Image (cartoon, rainbow, N blue to C red):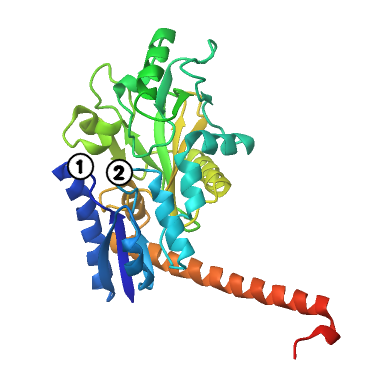
């Protein structure tokens, strides 16, 4: 089978570490697929559509693209191009990516379906209602991977809130303010319909006075104090009751956004045991040392199992979609012929 691995083309300003992080993951996925007997081509997605020609010649595309030229919103455009081209691809559909990237949109959908989400607001200018609960976290409204999140993102005073909103608004088009929820940070992953074991981020080694949050440095600056202070545990030490409750809520949230392929739902569980959905993440990092692979190992899958299952899901979804299209087209033709009647049948 011909497989294309599509990934972010190198952007201006990327460090050697940034480039290596992308290429190492791509290389590992390529190795898994080659060992499984597939022909593999690595294709960087850059502005323009030259990359699409190679994708159209493939039997399936492993879509590891999280943007184009470091622009996050282009992630959904890449998936949309693949869908229009009729190429089977791994992961979420473009509309799911758009919904989940736009945090206010995702929160509104989850709120409407009764899924607990911390109180949030998009500031009108730099103004936030005086009764908005503190502490609060201020972050970009349409970025992922903890971009724009630091220790300074948590504010505890009205003045600090106003200042942080103003500062972040100068860097990003949209900002969201959300009530900060203390407690445990837990997550549930999905591959297809299968929920994976609950994982946790242990913040007990964070520096004194630091907020227990997964900021940008915690994810992307190895050796930083935030990185050392935020250690993953999987499976998480949770009761059966909490595990079942988190899994059910995660499944509901995943369905609300239309999740397909693979994803992860992030939670905070407060001191009263109440879970709150922080984010729904389609196409989370597929690196061997990332959270989804860790969850997969906890359920007994190897990294190779995880990658091949995700590819098989993409092929099965494409086959079902094709069958549905054929059935719909056949039904449409049948209804048209019925309306024409026997005397109007073409010769």
Left or right: 168, with 206 as reference point: right
Residue 3: image location, x then y, percent: 32, 70
Report whether residue 302 is seen. no
Question: Which of 49 and 328 lies nearest the eye of the viewer?
Answer: 49
Are circles 2 and 1 on residues that touch, CB within 8 Å?
yes
Residue at numbered disc 2: 70
Where 305 falls versus 65 (above or below)?
Answer: below
Left or right: 108, with 34 as reference point: right
Where 118 falls versus 125 (above or below)?
Answer: below
Q: Residue furthest bottom?
A: 347
Residue 197: image location, x then y, percent: 41, 48
Q: CA distance from mark 2 to mark 1?
A: 9 Å
Residue at numbered disc 1: 14
Report whether residue 121 is seen. yes
Q: Residue at x 58, y 74 (%)?
A: 323
- The secondary structure type at the circle numbered 1 is loop
């Amino acid at each position: 089978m011909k497989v294309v691995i599509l990934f972010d083309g190198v952007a201006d300003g990327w460090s050697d570490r940034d480039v290596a992080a992308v290429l190492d993951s791509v290389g590992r996925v390529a190795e898994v697929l080659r060992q499984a007997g597939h022909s593999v081509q690595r294709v960087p997605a850059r502005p323009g559509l030259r990359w699409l020609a190679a994708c159209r010649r493939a039997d399936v595309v492993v879509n590891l693209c999280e943007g184009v030229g470091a622009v996050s919103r282009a992630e959904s455009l890449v998936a949309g191009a693949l869908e229009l081209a009729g190429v089977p691809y791994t992961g979420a559909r473009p509309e799911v990516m758009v919904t989940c990237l736009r945090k206010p949109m995702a929160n509104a959908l989850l709120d409407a379906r009764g899924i607990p989400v911390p109180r949030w607001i998009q500031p009108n200018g730099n103004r936030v209602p005086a009764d908005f609960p503190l502490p609060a976290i201020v972050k970009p409204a349409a970025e992922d991977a903890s971009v724009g999140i630091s220790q300074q993102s948590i504010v505890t005073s009205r003045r600090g809130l106003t200042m942080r909103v103003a500062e972040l608004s100068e860097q990003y088009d949209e900002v969201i303010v959300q009530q900060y929820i203390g407690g445990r940070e837990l997550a549930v992953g999905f591959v297809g319909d299968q929920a994976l074991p609950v994982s946790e981020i242990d913040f007990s080694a964070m520096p004194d006075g630091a907020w227990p949050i997964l900021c940008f440095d915690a994810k992307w600056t190895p050796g930083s104090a935030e990185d050392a202070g935020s250690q993953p545990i999987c499976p998480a030490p949770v009761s059966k009751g909490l595990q079942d409750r988190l899994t059910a809520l995660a499944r509901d949230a995943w369905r609300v956004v239309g999740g397909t392929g693979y994803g992860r739902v992030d939670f905070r569980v407060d001191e009263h045991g109440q879970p709150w959905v922080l984010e729904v993440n389609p196409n989370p990092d597929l690196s061997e040392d990332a959270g989804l692979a860790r969850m997969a190992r906890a359920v007994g899958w190897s990294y190779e199992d995880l990658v091949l299952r995700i590819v098989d899901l993409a092929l099965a979804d494409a086959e079902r979609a094709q069958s549905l299209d054929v059935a719909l087209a056949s039904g449409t033709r049948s209804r048209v012929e019925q309306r024409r009647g026997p005397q109007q049948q073409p010769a």
